[in-house]
Image (tube, rainbow, N blue to C red):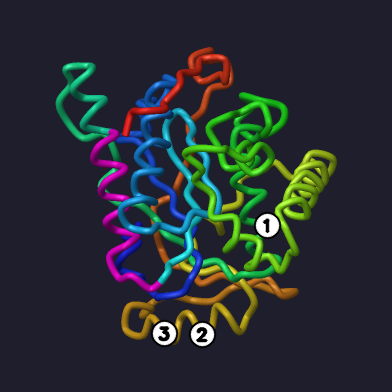
Amino acid sequence: MPRANRHHIPGYIWHITHRCHKKEFLLKFARDRRRWIGWLFEAKKRYGLSILNYTVTSNHIHLLVLDNGGYDTIPRSIQLIAGRTGQQYNQRKERKGAFWEDRYHATAVESDDHLAQCMVYIDMNMVRAGVVKHPQEWSFCGYHEIQKPKERYGIIDYRRLIALLHMRNIEELQELQMAWVVEALSSERLGRESKWTESIAVGSEHFVSATKERLGIRARGRYMVGKNGAFELREAANSYSVNLDAKNDVVRPKNMYVWDGIV
């Protein structure tokens, strides 16, 4: 899979996915998911990472960010978050070896209806896995924070997200986010969509075509697919698979710890 900084384009929205080494359940305990979120907050403070949404599962993460033009912001942030999370886990468990897969995948997302669809896809992750019945039951995610904003240690960049979705205020964002989830639940659109985790870009034909052109030689061998206003820039890549077992109690939301003060 491609590294996010290899496809760096300033001003783009990126959906980043990163999985644990060999799909192991290294984030199965709430304390480790809380640590990852804690370091995500630290990346926001240190590097100005603009975070639009996220979710932490038991063996992978989803992170939706806006590239604010700082060339090293995203790669340095991922290095900090992934490195410190893995280091602390290995120290606690007296473990050696890799915590993460060596590569994380980044998909460029257009800032319109495609952004809204990507938001819902991230929100519905643990519902697809069968761990919860509604995103509000999983506290390790942006949905939970958007619906119940934190007074301290807030992570979501509400101002940017509201602007990108062409909304007026956070109340409208909360209302529409709930409506999107209700629609997804009622339509049973719970299947995995590879475009969000394997494509280089997702959006309109113009957006995907322009992205390919901006990537230049780095887009060699990539090809566009799509119809009815939804297009992808694809490449041959290993399938990004999730291996979640809803029967595993340790991934349930009740297994929870407070992370305030960790960073």
Q: Are marks 2 and 3 in contact (CB under 8 Å)?
A: yes
**Does 260 sit left or right of 5 as displayed?**
right
| Quadrant housing residue 220 | bottom left
The amino acid at mark 3 is: Arg
What residue sits right under mark 3 in the picture? 214
What residue sits right under mark 1 in the picture? 117
Position of the N terminus, as image quadrant, is: bottom left
Q: Over which residues does the magenta segment extend? A: 69-85
Front-lying residue, 198 or 70: 70
Residue 242 seen in render: yes
**Does 162 sit left or right of 91 as displayed?**
right
Q: Callout 2: 10 Å neighbours few (<14), some, many (20+)?
A: few
Q: Position of residue 196 (x, y in %)?
A: 55, 56
Q: Residue at x 57, y 80 (%)?
A: 207
Q: Position of residue 16 (x, y in %)?
A: 44, 54
What residue sits right under mark 2 in the picture? 210
**Does 99 sit left or right of 226 as displayed?**
left
Q: CA distance from mark 1 to mark 2?
A: 20 Å
Secondary structure at numbered mark 3: helix
